[in-house]
Amino acid sequence: MTSTPRPEPLAATDARLRTLAGSLTLEQQVSLLTGADVWSTRAIPEIGLGRVVLSDGPAGVRGEDFDERHDSVSLPSGSALGATWSRDVARRYGQVLGQEARRKGVHAILGPTINLHRSPLGGRHFEALSEDPLLTASLAAAYVEGVQSMGVGATPKHYLANEAETDRFTADSVVAGRPLRELYLAAFEEAVTAARAWLVMSSYNSINGTTASENDLLETPLSTEWGFDGVVVSDWTAVRSVEAANANQDLEMPGPVGHWGPALVAAVEDGRVPRARITEKVTRILRLAARVGVLDGFEPAVAAPAGKYDGAALAREAATRGAVLLRNEGGLLPLDPASLRRVAVIGHNAEQARTQGGGSATVQPRHTVSPLEGLRKALPADAVVHYSRGAKVAEGLQEFPRMELHNPVGNVPGLRVTFLDAAGAEIGGEDRLASRLVWFGAGIPEGTAAIRLDTVWTAPGAGLHTIGIGTVGRVRLSVDGAEVFDDELTDHTNVLGAALFDPPRRTLGVTTAAGGGVALSALYRLPAGPGIPLTAILLGEETMVADPEAEIAEAVENARTADVAVVVVGTNAAIESEGFDRQNLDLPGRQDALVEAVAAVNPRTVVVVNSGSPVLMPWREKVAAVLLGWFGGQEFGDAVAHILLGTAEPGGRLPTSWPAALEDVPVLDTTPVDGRLVYGEGIHLGYRAWLKQQAAGGAAPAYPFGFGLGYTTFALGAPSLPAAVDVGGDVEVSVPVTNTGSRAGRAVVQVYLARSDSAVDRPVRWLAGYKDTVLDAGASGTVAIRVPARSLAHYDGGWQQERGVFTVLVGRHLEDDFQVAEVEVR
């Protein structure tokens, strides 16, 4: 892995940074260690220091606000990126994000999320890359390189052992030393040592009894062994005390008020915190400022980024390269467009696809392409597409489609937002496009006591509709001039930003005529007193289904006479989001019954799964084809259409094992007991746990780690490798690969290691290297894969290597019919 193309800080430059840091007063130094606001650090103009702007998120750059008018490129989720098994795609993914950051005036991106897929119930499973530390580390490092090649800082997060959302602020992750090093730290290591990340984010949770922002892990291995010279930024509100200043925690976010400030000045003055620690933290912040170009007198790390990147094209490519074909009976896919006259497209997610997970990862794209839209665009003009919803997915209030809203004040699409002072006088206003509005640290004028929303909603059809409002706080709602609600909506989750994810709501039924408009007016009163400035208001409609069986019956009749039935099933942000873990792996609503019914009448049924993490598929062997699309970003629908119609190949391989049943999953728990979440599986995480379970006679997954079909076939030859290597040496494995099919395609060659007679506990086998290649039909080539010495090592107070023979297994997935060789470590 090559490092980010930037000059290393010269000793003289570093010395100047330290001198500058030391020239500041204690009060000035401490002021730099807490954010100036929700999204930026403090500036000190007299020394030429500007503010550093940070922004969510891992799959798009939102900027300093949640304003839908300030749109962002929305890339596929982390799990989709993990499924590409492509360092090249990950690097270009990072470059697009870096470009987006520069466009929005952002200096550091809060990503990648590289916690491991420990349990499929994890709420942010979609945001992370994989269940394997080597795959995660290599893709994360490439992502970081891509971002920082654009002169923007990347922030690997959340350090450390932050694999669940339940009680995330207080949970203690209890992890033994060996899995801590071999799995959870290993996932971060390459992003720091090879890609040289400029920031790292400390997590909310504790690790082995000490909260992350005060944990010694911030020093060792991060700073000492790995040589990290960047800024450790806290997750928002994760600094809990002055004591964190005695750890290698550098920046407390958000600001301007936190646990440091005057309390930290006092702690330095009375000797509880050494002044040298403060100077070191300030030096790191100044180093970051210099790297991103906001410190006068210092050259930025990247003065002028090379290249211009098409964000939409990369989003489409990443969605295509990450889509995993799990089943393709009889070679139904790819479909022949010329033979299609009637296509049934079925499913709530076909029309309202979920393209990103919920929570801080959410951005506001200019557009999204649904599978329904993508297929309609891609199919020949004489092919008729019939759509049926079939089964409701979206629970709760969903924001109104923008084309259904009219701003009665500006006489433009959308709605009018008016900011009022305590006396009710208008102090500002704006014309907005979306009916889900969020202000987090920016956008509300000073002196605002209330916010009024006015719009006219045109219902999509006549009849009874369930509409309402969601927020936290005091709100009044009027419909066609009549007050229907005036009360407090209370959040009982105690989760920071819960209103962003799933706000408490009040709904009512409204009967409309076809094309009739409904005037809606809401008045929200801002709470008094201090606190993080977060306000979220949602006006929307809840999908109500009077007769679920009738909806399924309609879809069945649609599918019965179709040349092919494409059923899109999935989840949404109420299922997969920051802030809470999943309760099960079931598809919500009646989607399983829908698939079963459609497949019973049309043997040419293709199911597209639109989820960020594993779901159960009890019907998987009753349908002709299954394609995992993940949360596919803004171009998701086009990617699905291109794959189904054969203009692109599904390029993905599973980054995580997919179970057949919830009770089969060997590592499942996300809920702390007495405040402790014990990682009792040790080194046997993900597919390693499945292999251990299978070896004891237990269940296997429905689809194993690394699995994925394509539209061609490959044969792997016997690998070539040295018979022996010295302790500490890498192993170079060369594998002949031949495309034995009729069209070009991509092979992902995976190398696993095994050692059955080990003196230490080991997985049955573990991923040690991988590489992809694209070959034309009938073509052959050789793939060279480096197996790093670390893959042959285990941790026992330090990295150790057993001498003796290791088995080398080369294949296309974890359960393949491997090509087998051996290497001796001597």
Image (cartoon, rainbow, N blue to C red):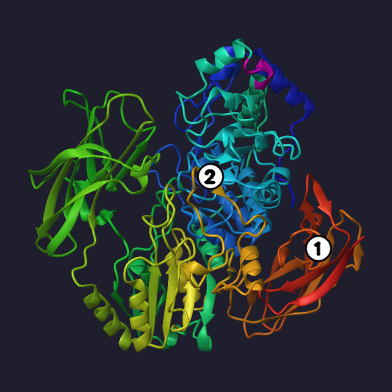
Left or right, 283 with reference to 584: right
Of 446 and 168, the residue lying toward us: 168
Q: Is residue 637 above or below residue 602?
A: above
Q: Quadrant of residue 542?
A: bottom left
Where is mark 1, residue-wise? 758
Looking at the rendered image, the quarter that the C terminus falls into is bottom right
Where is mark 2, residue-wise? 676
Does 826 appear in magenta?
A: no
Left or right, 579 with reference to 826: left
- As helix, strand or loop, the secondary structure at mark 2 comes to strand
* Residue 157 showing in the rendered view: no
Q: Is residue 596 above or below residue 212?
A: below
* Residue 3 showing in the rendered view: yes
Q: Position of residue 154 (x, y in %)?
A: 60, 42
Q: Is residue 755 above or below residue 265?
A: below
- As helix, strand or loop, the secondary structure at mark 1 comes to loop
Does 276 appear in magenta?
A: yes
